[in-house]
Image (cartoon, rainbow, N blue to C red):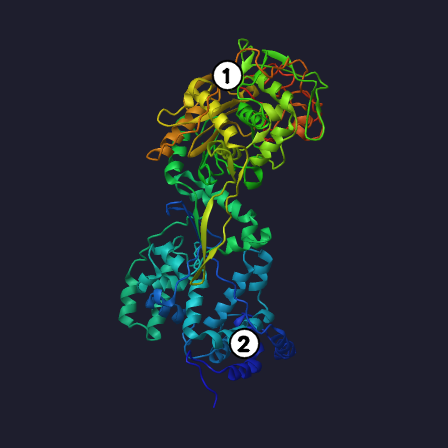
Amino acid sequence: MPKKRSGGGLSPAQQAAKFLGVSVLAGAVTAGIALPAVGALGLAAKGSVESFDELPANLKTPPLSQRTTILDADGGQIATVYSRDRTVVALKNISPYMQKAIVAIEDSRFYEHGAIDLKGVLRALNANARSGEVSEGASTLTQQYVKNVFVEEAGDDPTKVAQATQQTIGRKIAELKYAIQVEEELGKKKILENYLNITFFGQQAYGIEAAARRYFSKSAKDLDLQESALLAGLVQSPSRYDPVNDEAEARKRRNTVLQRMAEVGDISREEAAEAAKAPLGLKVSRPKNGCITAVDDASFFCDYVREVFLSDPVFGKTKADRAKIWNQGGLTIRTTLDPQAQASVQQSLKDHVYQSDSVAAASTLVEPGTGKVVAMGQSKPYGYGKDETEINFSVDHAMGGSNFGFPTGSTFKPFVAAAALEKGKPATQTYSAPFEMPYPATVRGCEKPWVNDKGYKLENENESEVGPYALKEAMAKSVNTYFVQMIEDIGMCPVVTLTDKLGIVQGNGEKIPEVPSSMTLGSTGLSPLTMASAYAAFASRGMYCTPIVIEAITQKIGNEQKSLEVPKSTCSRAMSEETADAVNTLLQGVVDSGTGQAAGLSDRANAGKTGTTDERRNAWFVGYTPNMSGAVWVGSASQEVEMKNITIGGQYHSLVFGGAVPGPIWKDAMTGALAGKESPSFNLVDIPDAQNGGDGESDGNNGDSGNSNGGNSGNGGDSGLIGGLDGGDADGGDTGTGDAGTGSTGTGDTGTGDTEPDPSFSIPGGFFRGAGEGPGGRD
């Protein structure tokens, strides 16, 4: 005699025999298909059996997608993200009331039959034949579970979802075969557990744990009788019986479940009647999905974590592989975010730049020596409404940032100085640095020289800025002509070599173009994260560490957890300790007595550099202590706002300087971020004031170039019309924002610019999403 399993139901042989006898009928009935003629059933029978034999032997059961939790460095929750809000729980953690309710209403003979309920099939067939339409179905709980597996495997692909739910005999045949397999392999209790974890309960809740928390703000193990009955009733039609939107319909359905529970003997009729009188008792918790819900305004950091996961090969060979893991979820991601630093950054931004201002501000803090990104914020919050944005101004375009980054102005000058020091130039290097001068006629590049064939000129911010200057004073005052003479002296290749070691690329991911405006005066668009990470190398005495945001990840698959490999920061020497020490000494002078005095910290060693681009379209402050590096950018993403006679954060500014708005933001952000933390010192060097006309003086008359292409105009390049859209190389004028012509990128503000290109087409507003507008270089 065939042996029954402990889970109940028939043996595989019995199941197969019964299946072959009624497969077509069961398939038709359970799929809800009314077949009017016996002939039709006969014609389908042969094909159904053949289809059954051709199906793969085993059901593919993908891991259930679950919510992912993103944590800060202290273990606090930043946000939860998911494609499906689900938390898998064991059957022992599901209320007995819930277990009984779902069985009573969906498959009351669940523990008596196998994968197929033949009695139910015949009953449904008879009812449907009498009515001539589908009035009753006969899917068992096991068959419903199999169907849900098909839907889960389809994911968010609408074509696959349609295939998984289509009303055809073929699909039902597959359901029936796999239901037999599942019954044999899992047994009744595991099937019930899996079903309650996979099924959809409406309101974005997948699985009973998410449903219990969504509707009643409690765990599934704590559901009472009437709560269980309500949730069990939702499964048939989550939208129709949604208690949030139709209380009367939900109550009626709940009471139907209670009545059914009494009919099958799970509860008494008195218990059912009493529970039916109870209110629904909802305590709804609204879905909180995605980075938009992140705490402490860490939405952009959260989104950057997602971008890192989807782009880093450590999480999968292809983006599709990585996206599959991300969408499957069940991840607990511990990040590098320091909640103290994040709160300080965001508060400083709110204090100094209002959400409604015509310009925005962004700031990123990085830990020197580790590459850890500890804070990332901006003045316009994450969102899609007025004065909101989904663009992360702190990162490159490929990671959700602006199209090209933002021209950095004079904050680029320390890289030129570091390259010259690495080349062997002394820290007392002196150049004539006149107020106004032509760009050099040629400047050496790595492969070919740059030629000033347009006769570009530049000037300093103030007429009083007339050399000779030594490096120390030139850096403190941010003297443009000095650094152009320095690049003429050393050539551009040393700067390229250094910036490559510092991970500096344009916001669009391309290398910095070898043109003097990019190599000296910051006409190229970069991101705050790039700048903060590069300056961190000065703070760590020449060691550059690639930025990281993920410390550790565990993944829950079912009830099992495993650790995932995460990206590691790669630290390498970008410059000698001596060079870094000299730069730190120079940049400490900027905050002590130079253009960055308003940003200086009074309680600890600090250094930094201001930067403002032509027409005041961008203002920067990038600075650091030995244990924290930060960059602040202020401007408009469209690069259309000239920050002159402007009110920002409730304060009027006739002209915005890097030290005037970004500097105080940096100061307040760093003060709060470092409160209570150690205060190490720099390894400063003695840089004596050089005598006028000292070593290495240049006559500055060779006429270097400006932006060589009509300004950055947004793409950080040197290529022609509107910043490189047509690929020209030194032919477009300056657009008034480059360093060409007399429109230098001085130490404070604009020049007059050269002639602008005359496009034959109009440029729509907002076309340059975060584009750069010119070579900057002032202040």
* Foreground of the two, 370 or 397: 370
Name the spot of residue 712 as percent of width and height, x first: 62, 26
Indicate whether 204 appears above or below 262. above
The residue carrying pointer 2 sits among few (fewer than 14), some (14 to 19) or many (20 or more) residues within 10 Å by Cα, namely: many
**Residue 29 percent coordinates (x, y):** 53, 73
Is 112 drawn above or below residue 687 in the view shown? Answer: below
Q: Which residue is mark 1?
A: 473
CA gap between label 1 and label 2 equals 89 Å
Element on which disc 1 rests: helix
Q: Can the viewer see residue 660?
A: no
| The furthest residue to the bottom | 1
Q: Residue at x 38, y 28 (%)?
A: 668
Residue 433 screen position, x and y as percent: 58, 13
Count up the numbered dots: 2
Residue 233's quadrant in the figure?
bottom left
Q: Residues within 10 Å of mark 1 (few under 14, many from 20)?
A: many
Given this view, does label 1 or label 2 mark the residue nearer the observer? Answer: 1
Q: Is residue 442 left or right of residue 94?
A: right
Secondary structure of residue under mark 2? helix
**Residue matched to label 2:** 26
The amino acid type, in three-letter code, at marker 2 is: Ala
Could you say where residue 318 lies in the image, as x and y percent from the top left?
Answer: 60, 52
Dividing the picture into quadrants, the one containing residue 25 is bottom right
Q: Is residue 60 above or below residue 427?
A: below
